Amino acid sequence: MKYTLATRLVNELVEAADEKTLARTIARYGRVDLLLVDELDYMELDRRGAELLFQVLTEREEKNSVAIASNESLSS
């Protein structure tokens, strides 16, 4: 299991993209059995951050689980 804050994950992905190590970073997040992303609701993702986060989620698709934690209610 890997626990991370959404801001920390997105910042790590942006840095990895800038340093040309994105594929390795995404693969590392793809290997853990359970990825728990907390406080996704606290940040507004820009397009780049959203695309990078989507790449991590896509890497995990049909292989390993993802849990999203939020303090916000799901009311409309």
Image (cartoon, rainbow, N blue to C red):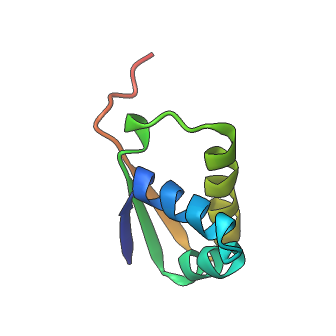
Image coordinates of residue 20 in percent, x first then y, are 71, 74
Q: Which of the 4 image quarters holds residue 13?
A: bottom right
- Identify the residue at the far top of this view: 76
Query: What residue is drawn where x is 50% and y is 57%?
Result: 11
Return the residue found at the far front: 19
Considering depth in this image, is 5 or 62 the residue closer to the camera? 5
Residue 55 image point, x, y percent: 70, 61
Is residue 8 shown left or right of residue 52?
A: left
Which quadrant is home to the C terminus? top left
Q: Is residue 71 visible?
A: yes
Q: Residue at x 55, y 75 (%)?
A: 29
Residue 46: x percent and y percent?
61, 37
User: Which image quarter holds the N terminus?
Assistant: bottom left
**Count of picture labels:** 0
| Foreground of the two, 53 or 14 | 14
Using the image as rendered, state which of residue 44 and residue 71 is in the foreground.
44
Residue 62 seen in render: no
Q: Nearer the viewer, residue 23 or 64?
A: 23
Is residue 64 left or right of 62 when viewed as pictured?
left
Identified at 40% across, 28% down, the residue is 74
Q: Residue at x 39, y 74 (%)?
A: 2
Residue 70 lies, with reference to residue 52, above or below; the image says: above
